[in-house]
Image: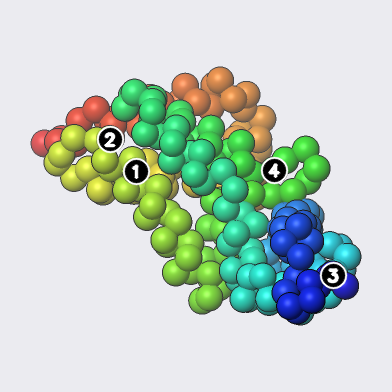
Amino acid sequence: MEKVLPTGEPRRRDAVATRAALLTAARSLIGRRGIDNTSTREVALVAGVNQALVYRYFGSREKLIVEALGSGSAELLDTIAAVDSSEIPGALLRGILQATTADDGSVSSLSTLATSAHNDALRPVIRQRIEALTESVSARLDEPDSALRAELLVAVGIGVAVMREKIGTHALVDADDATLHEYVDRMCALLVADGSPRP
């Protein structure tokens, strides 16, 4: 139960801590059970708070999930803005893969969100998150077709992450990071350096 001030408002310190506990619990449960099998009741139970606080702080299950999986997004956008354009494919792949599973089993990943695109409530938010990333990449590419090339680059990163971390295909799981990055860099070099279609 949250402590309240005489005005009836929750203490800010407790509100911040409760919100953080809910996000941590959501990441942990999603990491172990997936988005579809994570309920607000279980998130609240793991966080040690009343289920009503999920809706108070986040408004809906979907908004909680999106925020829980959103950490790392700002850092990835900053990285894309800072690296040389030739390093964009590697930066994208590292950012997407590194965010996938933390040491505590929690998940914070664009690829995790992407695997829930079947959810009508999550789909617009997933699209918004991906579009923010593709706009950042597109701004670093010369014309022609910079927006299309940016979406293709992001699709490669998310696709590799989904196959490696969610589906677990053997070759991608077994590949060391250096080899994986080398192939992705070579595969994406044309998208980064030259947007002109080949005859």
- Secondary structure beneath label 3: loop
Q: Are marks 3 and 2 in contact (CB under 8 Å)?
A: no
Is there any visible trace of residue 22 in the rendered image? no
Closest to the camera, between mark 2 and mark 4, is 2
Residue on which disc 4 sits = 101
Badge 2 density bin: few <14, some 14–19, many ≥20, Cα 10 Å:
many
Task: Please identify the residue farthest to the front as the structure is shown.
Answer: 6
Which one is earlier in the sequence, the residue at label 1 or at label 4?
4
Residue on which disc 1 sits = 136
Closest to the camera, between mark 3 and mark 2, is 3
Q: Position of residue 27 (x, y in %)?
A: 72, 55
Amino acid at pointer 1: Ser
Closest to the camera, between mark 1 and mark 4, is 1
Tell me the number on the disc at residue 140. 2
- All told, the count of numbered labels is 4
Quarter in which the N terminus is drawn: bottom right
On screen, 77 above or below 179?
below
Quarter in which the C terminus is drawn: top left
Residue sitting nearer the eye, 55 or 25: 55
Amino acid at pointer 3: Lys
- Secondary structure beneath label 1: helix
Using residue 177 as the reference point, say whether residue 3 is left or right of it. right
Q: Are marks 2 and 1 in contact (CB under 8 Å)?
A: yes
Rounded to the nearest whole Å, what is the CA distance between mark 3 and mark 2? 48 Å
Residue sitting nearer the eye, 159 or 136: 136
Image point (57%, 53%), residue name: 70
Badge 3 density bin: few <14, some 14–19, many ≥20, Cα 10 Å:
few
Which one is earlier in the sequence, the residue at label 2 or at label 4?
4
- Secondary structure beneath label 4: loop
Amino acid at pointer 2: Arg
Residue on which disc 3 sits = 3
Image point (35%, 48%), residue name: 134
